[in-house]
Image (cartoon, coloured by chain):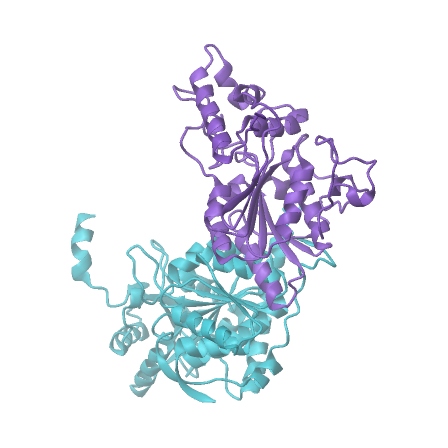
Amino acid sequence: MAYPDVRQTADRTAGNRLLPLRQRAVQADPDRPGTLASGHRACQGCGEALGARWVLDAAMRATGGRLVTVNATGCLEVFTTPYPETAWRVAWLHSLFGNAPAVASGVAAALRAQGRTDIRVVGQGGDGGTVDIGFGTLSGMFERDDDVLYVCYDNEAYMNTGVQRSGATPPAARTSTTPALGPAPGNPFGQGKDVPRIAMAHEVPYVATATVADPRDLERKVFRAMAFRGARYLHVLVPCPLGWGAAPHDTIHLARLAVQTGLFPLFEAEAGEVVAVTRLPGPKVPVAEYLRRQRRYAHLFAEPPRTDVIAAVQAIADRNIARYGLEVVPDA
Amino acid sequence: MRDQVEGSHAIARAVVRCRPQVVCAYPISPQTHIVEALAAAVRTGELAPCEFVNVESEFAALSVAIGASAAGSRAYTATSSQGLLFMAEALYNAAGLGLPIVMTVANRALGAPINIWNDHSDSMSQRDSGWVQLYAASNQHAADLHLLAFRLAEELSVPVMVCVDGFVLTHAFEAVDLPDAARVDRFLPAFRPRQVLDPEHPVSIGAMVGPDAFTEVRYLAHTTALRATDRIPALAAELASVLGRPVPAPLHPYRLAGAETVVVALGSVLGTVQDTVDELRQGGRKVGALGLTAFRPFPAAALRQALTGATRVVVLERAFTPGVGGIVTADLRAALADLDVSARTVVAGLGGRAVTRDSLRRVLTAAHEDALAPLTFLDLRRDLVASAERGA
């Protein structure tokens, strides 16, 4: 199923409810699948719960409901399935922390052997399950080009276990294992993994990044991903109020700032090549605007402020902007 | 049809007859020939429909099998040694999820020191994982046990590992009778999963269970194991009638009538043990042998019955627990607690050391004369350990 050619003006709402049904975003449709039902136990303002519902509703719509989901251990698994309850209205399997991509490969192999390739497979996990402990199985799924869409909901640390540092934790961020202590407080610079680019290096059919600040962009990318066969990867930035030390009502705002600063570039890649980027909507926002709203960066704004560290984070944003060509070139 | 084949190929052919839909594997000696043969069977179309998935680790191999089984396909994999340990987390997971995966373990020692040869340290280390463990005494036995494994696994929704001595069996050529597909089909019906990932009837599999129900889930694992204890002899008898030859399980008794001293052993060493028993019987010593095909679940009642007339038991073990001794012996002692039977442990054949008839004759004679220590390391080279022991 093709994604509706939505021409709404507001990019800050789930969808314009005045539009004809066929042109609405999945989340603006009164008959949206509701794959992740309400009543689950996520924190207030949880970006991951939002991202998972939007991704899976879009995937359900794109496949006509013929979907199987494999979930890594983590917040998303814990807050959705405290036995005997479940929030999932989709065939859902949780095995372990580090094996969701391989389990998804197994489901896909079984469906192929059964001649049921109409049923599609989505694997999902947080950044810990994806970029760290599950990375080997993710890379294996990529290189075999198994027919799986794997979605990483990246909240940039191990939130489920109490905000420990992961390979996706950004430089300078305070976590419980990179405390804001000593001469170089927070997470070290020069470490970590850029998994979307690593996915591209596998030359899988489709790689995209998205955030929970733009549901229509996210939905469109899920639809695009489901139009391909083979291994696909979607990396979604999902702010975590608890781990980031941010207000629950700031989740969407922070995701948008991450894009507007250039810290989280939005792009799509096919077969290893970038085919589309989302340009910044205006002049780039200084990273300090993004950092100062999160207590995980509070040590940068103490007395004396660490302008050197803020400048180093700004350099990362500037490098992203240059690498992906994110700045709108003014008319001559 | 009887064929002179390598053990690995006999196993692979038996697995092909069981028609798994997903086979996944990561190579490790001495498991490799099994999965190579299966890869070929899938490529030629002999095994179809089947997806052969080349994975990047043993952890992934079992994880692929978990996904495939949960999606309703018969799933098979094989491993050995370090590979089994690398799977450990997924082993418990597959058992907890009740997924009827069948896996061949080509038994091999665990490092360090690294050693590719046979003993039972690998599978013994996973005895509490919730998997049924069957140990093959010969390549015929190994092939037959795979048929039994799939049937048992799917009847009870429990994973089964068939343990086959690495190299000693996997790489040995023997005449093996491989049943035709029609016979296997008579014994092994199509896989009907207990629950399945089906978009039409979505279920959540693998929920988080807290203190309010966790004990009950674990208790049910125990009752499933007890049901397996009952089903193994029944299925072995049924398979034997289909195949027209005995399929010894859960026990493999040999000359137990009137035996005062009984050797209990697992795996391929049983052949040498039986030859030694013959020899000792000729010399007038009342010795018998009891092969343990099923180690998990432990066939305690059957063992007690089989050993009721014995005075002493010698447990020949290809693994041990440091500082304690025999692993099988501990279970056996618990099973025989109310019988007046003494148990001795002989740790033998570690890391591929040959278990010879001469050595066996020596320890069994000593045991028969009540002159064997509670724990013996067979053929221990004192010259190699003397200086370290002095240093300690």
Say left or right for B145 vs B368. Answer: right
Image coordinates of residue B29 in percent, x first then y, are 36, 66
Q: Residue furthest top?
A: A303
Q: Which chain is purple?
A: A
Near-viewer residue (B367 or A45) = A45
Which quadrant of the view contains residue B37? Answer: bottom left
When the figure is inspected, residue B232 is found, relative to residue B345, above or below; the finding is below
Say left or right for B34 vs A332. Answer: left
Image coordinates of residue B159 in percent, x first then y, are 55, 64
When the figure is inspected, residue B156 is found, relative to residue A22, above or below; the finding is below
Image coordinates of residue B270 in percent, x first then y, are 38, 77
Near-viewer residue (A191 or A80) = A191
Instruction: Determine if residue B125 is in view.
Output: no
Name the residue located 48 percent from the left edge and 78 percent from the top edge. B13
Which quadrant of the view contains residue B192? Answer: bottom right
Name the residue located 61 percent from the left edge and 30 percent from the top edge. A255
When the figure is inspected, residue B93 is found, relative to residue B240, above or below; the finding is above
Name the residue located 53 percent from the left edge and 34 percent from the top edge. A156
When the figure is inspected, residue A46 is found, relative to residue A131, above or below; the finding is above
Instruction: Determine if residue A96 is in view.
Output: yes
Q: Colour of chain B?
A: cyan
Image coordinates of residue A163 in percent, x first then y, are 53, 31
Q: Residue furthest front?
A: A332
